[in-house]
Image (cartoon, helix red, strand yellow):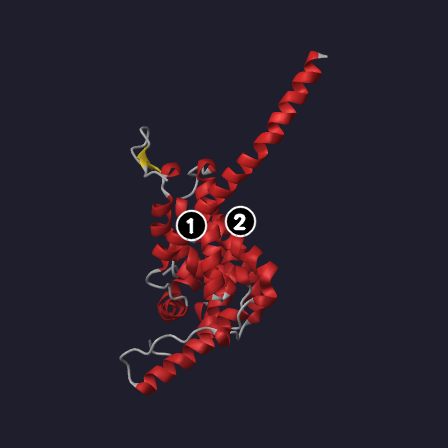
Amino acid sequence: MGGATSNPESNEPDVRQVSMEELVQEHADAVYRVALSICKDPILAEDISQDVLIKAWQALPSYRAEAPLRHWILRIAHNVSISTLRRRREDAMAPADLPEPPMTGRSVHMQVQDRLAIARFEAALGDLDSVSRSIVVLREIEGMSYSEMSNVLELPLPTIRTRLLRARRQLADALDGWQP
Amino acid sequence: MSVWRPGHPSIRKLHRWAKGQADSLDRHLSTCGYCADRLEASLTETDAPIRLALLELLVVPDELPDRLYANIDERMATRRELALIGEFFGLPLRTARAITSTDHGDE
């Protein structure tokens, strides 16, 4: 599992030579978030992340650099998460079973309000279809443009636009009045 | 922010759609990039809580990359060992085939 080498034509590192360790360190967080948003189970999300990173690393020789490497990996993450969920849908953990976030330094009242808001948000996120969940994560956390999301998820631009707007509407409703 | 054009819903109406109060705009918004962009731009401020809530919910464990790498490394080592075992047990079969095919070739 060797390190990255330079591409003499572009002076950019040749990502096809990226080591597994570099791939994991650079993209594990984003892959895990996409997986978790779709399957809602932290343990399953970690298993999916492993599968995605192995698949991506093995497929690196076929990567053509038409899109950023991260987008290519996140497309794999989305597809693997959806197919894994289809196979194991009945086993997916219910949102209520997810571990609670740790208490912070805010007042108890605020923390209770936070948890209620996050629980409503979690339920609203869970009500979205899996593609819309990916769209929200790619947009809000990865900061992708519509056309980038269209490329990653292989969906038409108007579909991305409409699903994102609808998803935001539902999520904003769930957070109504929440002061982070 | 872009200027309103005649023939398109007002930003107020778009906000009503965003609150679920103007479903009649569903079709228009699915095809009109101009209105979708206007709504998108005006909703940027309301996005901050969504982003924060997502980060709160989709927490990545601190040690995740190291743990993933260790597990992947172990899985790949196991695969290599299995491939080696397969190679070892496949050797007599390939030898037998090679001998058989040579016999046929001689005939």
The front one of A130 and B21 is: A130
Q: Residue at x 49, y 58 (%)?
A: A161
Instruction: Read off the residue under disc 1.
Output: B74
Q: Amino acid at mark 1?
A: Glu
Q: Nearer the viewer, mark 2 or mark 1?
A: 1
> Gap in Å between the C-alphas at discs 2 and 1?
33 Å
The front one of B78 and A130 is: B78
Mark 2: secondary structure = loop
Count neighbours of disc 2 (C-alpha within 10 A) and say few if under 14, some if 14 to 19, many if 20 or more. few
Q: Position of residue A170 (x, y in %)?
A: 49, 72
Q: Position of residue A142 (x, y in %)?
A: 38, 56
Query: Is residue B19 placed above or below A76 in the rendered structure?
Result: below
Q: Position of residue B56 (x, y in %)?
A: 37, 70
Q: Chain of mark 1?
A: B
Q: Amino acid at mark 2?
A: Glu
The front one of B89 and B81 is: B89
Q: Quadrant of the N terminus of chain A?
A: top left
Residue B37 visible to the viewer: no
Q: Residue at x 36, y 64 (%)?
A: B61
Mark 1: secondary structure = helix
Residue A169 visible to the viewer: yes
Q: Quadrant of the C terminus of chain A?
A: bottom left
Q: Chain of mark 2?
A: A
Query: Is residue B90 placed above or below B97 in the rendered structure?
Result: below
Residue farthest to the left, as pictured: A105
Instruction: Read off the residue under disc 2.
Output: A154
The reply to whether discs 2 and 1 touch (Cβ–Cβ < 8 Å) is no
Numbered label attached to residue B49: none
Q: Position of residue A93 (x, y in %)?
A: 53, 70
